[in-house]
């Protein structure tokens, strides 16, 4: 299930976000987490299975009911089992009235999820 990020998730969230190619630097990661904590238009969710947080997705609400996915990561030991697709599907359920897109950092995977759901 998708759970809204809370301050006590900071370490696990940073660990998961660090799998994004642009989030390798600790200073960058800290800045990213702070911007999710402080900007009410940016929302971060963790994916929990069997009591473990194994995935993360971060979005920016852009106005006009538009929502851009900025980050998506799954822990390496849980990849290629459909978790990434499930995270995207559940995000869409959280914001049913929104028009989604992926930013340049996630577009390759996000577009794949969207194309599959249209088939
Ligand atoms: C991208 C990511 C979230 C996918 O998570 P996952 O749980 O393994 O995804 P799923 O199991 O739902 O889907 C697996 C499919 O996505 C594909 N995929 C994995 N990474 C991909 C990428 N960067 N771009 C496009 N497709 C990708 C796999 O090849 C697989 O394809 P197949 O179904 O045709 O075999 C995960 O690989 C990850 O955390 N990567 C590091 C972070 C990252 O680079 N995020 C941005 C990706 S653009």
Image (cartoon, rainbow, N blue to C red):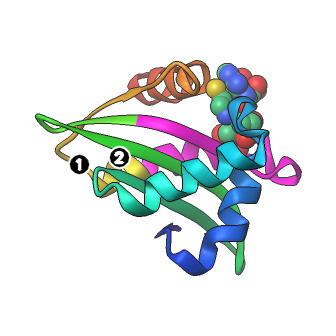
**Residue farthest along the right direction in this orientation:** 77
Residue 103: % across, % down:
46, 24
User: Looking at the rendered structure, which numbered label has been put on residue 92?
Assistant: 2
Q: Confirm or deny contact between disc 2 and disc 1 (CB under 8 A).
A: yes
What span is in magenta?
69-90
Query: What residue is shown with label 1?
Result: 96
- Look at 67% across and 48% down and name the residue there: 29
Measure how far apart labels 2 and 1 are at the Cα level: 6 Å
Decide: is 118 above or below 76. above
- Quadrant for residue 39, please give it: bottom left
Q: Secondary structure at mark 2?
A: helix
Residue 117: % across, % down:
44, 30
Quick check: 39 left or right of 72? left
Ligand 1 resides in the quarter of the picture at: top right
- Number of disc labels: 2
- Look at 33% across and 53% down and name the residue there: 93
Observer able to see residue 53? no
**Residue farthest along the front direction in this orientation:** 27
């Amino acid at each position: 299930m998708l759970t809204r990020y809370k301050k006590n998730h900071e370490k696990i969230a940073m660990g998961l976000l660090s799998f994004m190619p642009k989030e390798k630097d600790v200073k960058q990661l800290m800045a990213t987490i702070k911007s999710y904590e402080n900007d009410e238009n940016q929302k971060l969710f963790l994916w929990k299975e069997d009591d473990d947080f194994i995935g993360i997705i971060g979005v920016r609400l852009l106005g006009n009911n538009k929502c851009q996915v900025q980050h998506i990561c799954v822990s390496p030991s849980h990849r290629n089992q459909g978790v990434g697709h499930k995270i995207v599907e559940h995000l869409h359920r959280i914001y049913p009235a929104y028009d989604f897109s992926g930013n340049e950092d996630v577009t390759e995977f996000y577009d794949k999820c969207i194309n599959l759901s249209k088939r």
